Amino acid sequence: MFVTLHKKIVRLMAFLLFSILLYQCSNQPNLSSTDRLSRSQDTPIKNIIFLIGDGMSLGQITLGRLKAHGVEGKLNVEKMPITGYLYTHCADNLITDSAAGATELSTGFKTNKGMIGVLPDSTAVLTLLEYFRDNGKATGMVVTSSITHATPAGFAAHVPYRKQETEIAEQLVDSNIDVLLGGGKQFFLPQEDTLSVRKDSRNLIAEAQKKGYQFVDTRDKLLRVKKTRVLGLFQKDGLEHKPEEPTLAEMTEKALSLLTEDPDGFFLMVEGSQIDWGGHRNDPDYVAEEMLGFDKAIKVALEFARKEGNTLVIVTADHETGGLSITGGKKNGKNLEVRWTSTYHTAMPVPIFAYGPYSDEFSGVHDNTEVPRIIARIMGIDNFPRKLNYRVTASGKKQNGHN
Ligand SMILES: [Zn+2]
């Protein structure tokens, strides 16, 4: 009798101890609480995850948060320890766009509205992603727009005008970026294909495959990819949230699992592209859904960084869209009254959040061009920002012989 009871107690104790351990282990890399993440040690930075919510400022974040949790909860992005905000004006305009915004966040130079990876005089400038690539590190871009859209283009292409998406597609296939995931098949297929908007017979998907890329066009195929060089185009244009497409969080997780195989580190750009599209339509449900999809990708990035310890995570935006404000509703997030002041972008600043080594550097108020300059400084990258030794013509081709 006593022995049995004793055994039972021992078993119960063991079970409790095991449960506590299990809880602590599973709780460590999990961002389920409302706590803020702790600041990390300033160890050398190996990886950068740069997440951009297109058209995202405090209105969009607050709308997503209230719809998901009411006033009692936090989004994952709100658990990041370092916060600040950025001015977004571009070289020729108070109200910017994603082309100038992405160029400024990636190169450290101001440029004109609509321009991609070039100065106002069309001189090409180096992006941070290109710096990583040129120094033997892995690179990737993951978006829910076409992969040739203004934001990803601003990290890896050089053309005078953002609508030159067929030209941008050619440059992306030549860019040696390891992981490219998003939409935009129409810019890669030859004109003979019914989906194509190209005016030539180049098949950029076939060209990419020849260069060693694995091409995938469904969620299932993406989840099975094991090869680091992958081109995933899941729609003709922007993603449509169909079940056969991967989510932004799934694409981010896959990209991280592939890029982390490079022992030299990586640069990954992730964009919640359609927060902006919901803003242009003044559609609060669209904005909230996109914001929450982006926040799930942020969670994937933060959990990766928390495990690795040497990864800097930046979350910011190119500009605000819609002049979104919340003027009424319940504390539980029901019956929200949403007002808009524009169907275009506004001059409102955008937040910046940081987590990981040297993230303190991003605290405070900065111009958007300072973000890549700070990254270069804390990583010891010399000669940045940097002009490249060519200009691009109006058609987006390299004009050689210019310095
Ligand atoms: Zn926009």
Image (tube, grey):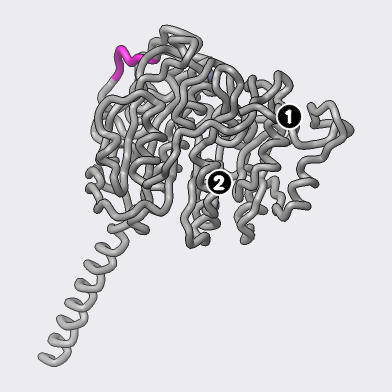
Direction from residue 387 to residue 217 in the image, left or right? right
Q: Residue 296: tell me if it is visible.
A: no
Residue for badge 1: 166
Q: Earlier in the sequence, mark 2 or mark 1?
A: 2
Q: Quadrant of the C terminus?
A: top right
Q: Magenta residues, as a range?
A: 324-329
Q: Which mark is residue 140?
A: 2
The residue lying at 46 percent from left, 25 percent from top is 109
Between 240 and 9, the residue placed more toward the observer is: 240
The residue lying at 48 percent from left, 58 percent from top is 264
Callout 2 amino acid: Gly
The picture quadrant where one finds residue 124 is top right
Q: Position of residue 182 (x, y in %)?
A: 61, 39
Residue 182 shown in magenta: no
Look at the numbered disc 2 and give the secondary structure of its residue: strand
Callout 1 amino acid: Thr
